[in-house]
Amino acid sequence: MTREILNIENLFVEYSNIRGKVKAVRGVNLKLYKGENLALIGESGSGKTTLGTAIIRLLPSSGYIKDGRIVYKGNGNEYDISKFSEKELRQFRWKEIAMVFQSALNSFNPVLKVWDQIYDTARAHGISNRNFVKERAISLLRYVQLDPERVINSYPHELSGGMRQRVLIAMSLLLEPKILILDEPTTALDILTQRNIIELLRTIKADMGLSMIFISHDLSLAAELADRVAVMYAGAIVELGSVEDIFYRPKHPYTLGLIKAVPTVTAGFRELYSIPGSPPDLINLTPGCKFAPRCEYKNSVCEKDEPMLVEVGQDHFVACFRHKEIGNGR
Amino acid sequence: MEDRAIIQLDHVSKSFTVRSGIFGGRKNMQVIGDLSLSIGRGEVLCLVGESGCGKTTTGKLIVGLIKPTSGRILFEGKDIWSMNNEEFKDYRKAVQIIHQDPYSSLNPVHRIYNILSAPLFRHGLVRNRSEAEEKVLDLLDRVDLTPPGDFIYKYPHQLSGGQRQRVAIARSLTLNPKFIVADEAVSMLDVSIRLSIIELLRRLKEEMNVTFLFITHDLAMAKYFGWEGRIAVMYLGRIVEIGPTPRVIENPLHPYTKALLMAIPEADPQVTRNKTPMKLRSLDIPSLLNLPPGCSFNPRCPFWIEGTCDKEVPDMYEPENDHYVSCFLFRGK
């Protein structure tokens, strides 16, 4: 049951720009189990999208994997994705791991009809049987509750935001991937559409049993869909645990701060607290815990050494020297 | 009309002309339809709705950036579009707007000093550079950009998103406004920054007794910021429900408000996983170019009454004190 399908080992990703090297992902260790929903939560610049794109090796040209391995376990074998050639990647992407990118409109070529994009995708991955692709596309579009005949002959701008997101999800399932990575799948969608996408993702998970990684700044998406949550800050995972542990028993001051900073609508009125300061510059990182400058629990040790992830409960890990003092829940 | 009101909208509608395609004809798109609203002095009114519902247009109409197609907008009882120059200048000083995107609302080639001192000079509130500097330092201090001396000669690109939004807020305060429209003022900011900006707005409201129109798509933020005020829910250019914030959140009346509250994902696994969303008749929002007859929510509404909701536009009913709803389910209640 709890067999791992992906194992990220000590991963470092950097971007080079004029000012220097941006250390976007710093020493991430993370496992993904078969059939689970893992949420990567963090703010802009926390490295969550970089981590996601590194997994399928679609980093922008200025980015590169500095160190570490990304081990994919499938078909009874182990593959290190970080060592794949372009040709191997083409065989691998979409078939084993597919990704749905943020901002549904920009993921489409505006001058191609939906059908042409679907067929192009299939051909790029070695399937050129037109009828087969068409049948599969139609059944998938119907599966995501779209009218296939209409959608397939539409240009992207003729579809609403929610419809485009559903088309992208359908396309990502075209080659039956084992892992689906979704970057901000509900951001910028209206509330009623968000709910619809969440329900759709639930159905997909139940029907197809694949593993999903959600990348989001939105805690409520994790609360809805995640089995486990990894909280990222300044390129590292600062807390990792079950969705209940993260939301009801957070042990990292940053996680606690995030949860206390988000208002809820129907859960009664509660006082909120904001986290002072702002995230660090990823080029000139200071020694010690990267959250220390904003942390009310910090002491002199926090400013010298960077804490490692330690297990504080069953499958609950936290990178904080002072985790014993962090409040029990809210 | 009550004299406490600082801003009133009197049957305001706004249409834009759009062209459909290169060779297509011109079409009329009604963005705001027959909107009447009264905002009391010192009040917080949250205007919530989804994208394209007309909430930003409403904000722009109130600050006089665009003219209504019909109807009147009154500031302290006077129609802003029939004011004389002197009155209009006073109104412009008194009513300010904070835009959504702090990355595009500040001129990138101007230093913070220039951004904040320009309106001061323009309206003759300062006479020379040293007075302006003093005033700008004071403004920066008020929005917690401390020490202000570190910020005054910076360019916007040297600041983070949260700091930029603080500058935008400082700019809205330069002329001691009575009324501020905050249009999605925190939506672009990170979660950990968002709340500190909200707290800042709250504090300014207390200190300066400013009236706020808080425009947002985020019901949770509206609830938090406007708990002591009112919420107005907009759908396709009309207000469908308006009332005291706790009442609208705890006892929503309009099917659309109910649908939103039942659907909204929340940052609490137990709460959010136990939601049972309302089954809507259609997922798609009608186009503003082709609004359905009658109540504009009727094609999606599970409670629609055939022959009524798709024929007539419902009036505003008041089934409980100060809590208004535009829905036939409440006719005669």
Image: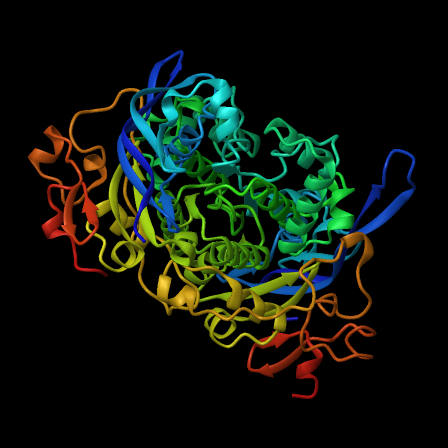
Q: Residue at (87%, 47%) from the top-left corner?
A: B27
Q: Where is residue B308 in the image (x, y as percent from the top left)?
A: 80, 79
Q: Position of residue A277 (x, y in %)?
A: 28, 38
- Quarter residue B235 falls in: bottom right
Q: Residue at (27%, 20%) from the top-left corner?
A: A284
Front-most of B137 and A220? A220
Q: Relative to B175, say whether A45 is above or below.
A: above
Residue lying furthest front = A76
Residue A108 at least partly seen:
yes
Q: Where is residue A279 in the image (x, y as percent from the top left)?
A: 31, 34
- Quarter residue A242 falls in: bottom left
- Quarter residue A79 falls in: top left
Q: Relative to A261, say whether A13 is above or below.
A: above
Q: Relative to A81, say whether A248 is above or below.
A: below
Q: Where is residue B304 in the image (x, y as percent from the top left)?
A: 72, 77
Residue lying furthest bottom = B332
Q: Residue at (71%, 58%) from the top-left corner?
A: B237
Residue lying furthest top = A18
Front-most of B77 and B47? B47
Where the N terminus of chain B falls, by quadrant?
A: bottom right
Q: In this view, does A217 lie to the left or right of A271?
A: right
